[in-house]
Amino acid sequence: MNISETVKSQHKFFFSDKTKCINLRKDKLIKLKNTIQKYETEILNALKLDLGKSFAESYMCEIVMIVSEINYTIKNIDKWAKSVRAHTPISQFLAKSKIIYEPYGVVLIISPWNYPFMLSLDPIIGAIAAGNTFVLKPSEYSVNTTKVLQKIIAETFETEYGAVICGDKDTTTELLKQKFDYIFFTGNTSVGKIVMKAAAENLTPLTLELGGKSPCIVDKTANVKLAAKRLAWGKFLNAGQTCVAPDYVYVHTDIYDEFVKLTKKYIVKFYGENPLNSNDLPKIITKKHFYRAVTLMENTDIIYGGKYDEDTQKLEPTIILNPDTNSGIMQNEIFAPIMPIIKYTDSDTLIKEIKRREPPLALYLFTANKKLKDKVLSQISFGGGCINDTIVHLATPYMPFGGVGSSGMGGYHGKYSFETFSHKKSILERSNIIDINLRYAPFYDKKINILKKIMK
């Protein structure tokens, strides 16, 4: 598929104004949902091949998320697309103000490999709902899922409306040279910088969904059993290859030993005594990523797990105790089923330590202490998170999901997706009945005095 010609054809189609029809947007979303359901088995098989995910995990974390988002969007799109009345100041006497939501135009969506189905289609839903056309560039690593995505997009959209362009980083580089009206990128921070630099060349607005080292704090007042259970689930879901996975865990010294013991218990409960043989433990996406993860465990205090299989690219859920802050595992986002557990005693010192790092995409706090909760939420900057749970804050259309600082910019999901892909056009409509001369020259003291009285 010729990149330049595809982008040109989408610009031409967008300028026809057909995508501004709300009924067309809804029809396309309905067709997208039906096509996803048609290829459901192929999607599950593709995710199994790419990431070793069980059908249950893929269905729960990828298909259900997308179908729910489509249903919610179809239900609410008419309301979202209406112009919104805005307050008019007294200085604009006899006028009406409103905000009109209009699509940007042609959108480039660059998706990652870790949730290759969900993180490809989720932004597409928002782009279509807002009235845009789109080009999707999926990851070259999740090849089987990409093939299914190509089928789904081709059956749902004409090429000038929605297209999939495959390839490696050279293809991405070529795409970034094109004139898009909006860019939505999900991936790591280093590539995010490249995307942002390329967007700046064309002054293209963008959303960056990145990552980072998301901390977790388990306070001494926490329900330790539930904390261990929910953290083991969140950390080892998708073999740790989740951008909002708890990266490392601080546990108060009073409950430290109990937490470690319970975490081991839940690993066995979830994945059995031999996790490498478990159908519920996904694999690491590629050999390159696999060996990177194995290297992170070198020279660390592994007290549980640590075994791996080069042939299957599986790595056991692993617990590491109190790693050195300068070690590779504490300097880089882990993105693997490895859980560093670090003992702490003083929450104020801990908060200062977390604040010294770049703002993470997520933060998780397990506590029954309201003062500590308020202190963490008010003093630490992060994208989003949970109190007494992990990851599930992103599974809602009622709140925006996104990062801050080095973990990203912008947010989406539900109405926030619609707004992300819409320009808010401000309109003031003035009456012709009266025209006040205060704003016109010549300006003299009397006019200034009148203005001062109005502005008091």
Image: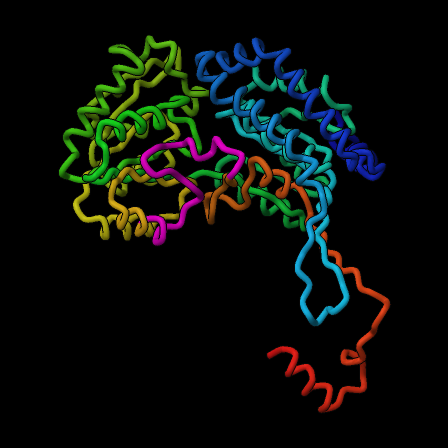
**Residue at the image point whose x is 34% and y is 34% from the top:** 247
Q: Nearer the viewer, residue 418 or 275?
A: 418
Q: Is residue 348 visible?
A: yes
Q: Position of residue 450 (x, y in %)?
A: 69, 84
Residues drawn in magenta: 376-398
The single residue placed furthest to the bottom in the displayed view is 445
Q: Position of residue 265 (x, y in %)?
A: 22, 19
Is 294 rendered above or below residue 312?
Answer: below
Q: Position of residue 317 (x, y in %)?
A: 30, 21
- The quarter holding residue 81 reads top right
Q: How many marks?
A: 0
- The quarter holding residue 97 reads bottom right
Quarter occupied by the N terminus = top right
Quarter occupied by the C terminus = bottom right
**Residue at the image point whose x is 66% and y is 16% from the top:** 34
Is 215 rendered above or below residue 442?
Answer: above
Q: Is residue 170 visible?
A: no
**Residue at the image point whose x is 80% and y is 80% from the top:** 437
Q: Position of residue 234 (x, y in %)?
A: 36, 27
Q: Name the side, left or right, on which 212 lies relative to 308.
A: right
Residue 379 magenta: yes
Which color scheme did the rendering employ for the protein?
A: rainbow
Q: Name the side, left or right, on which 122 lies relative to 279.
A: right
**Residue at the image point whose x is 77% and y is 78% from the top:** 439
Q: Nearer the viewer, residue 224 or 155?
A: 224
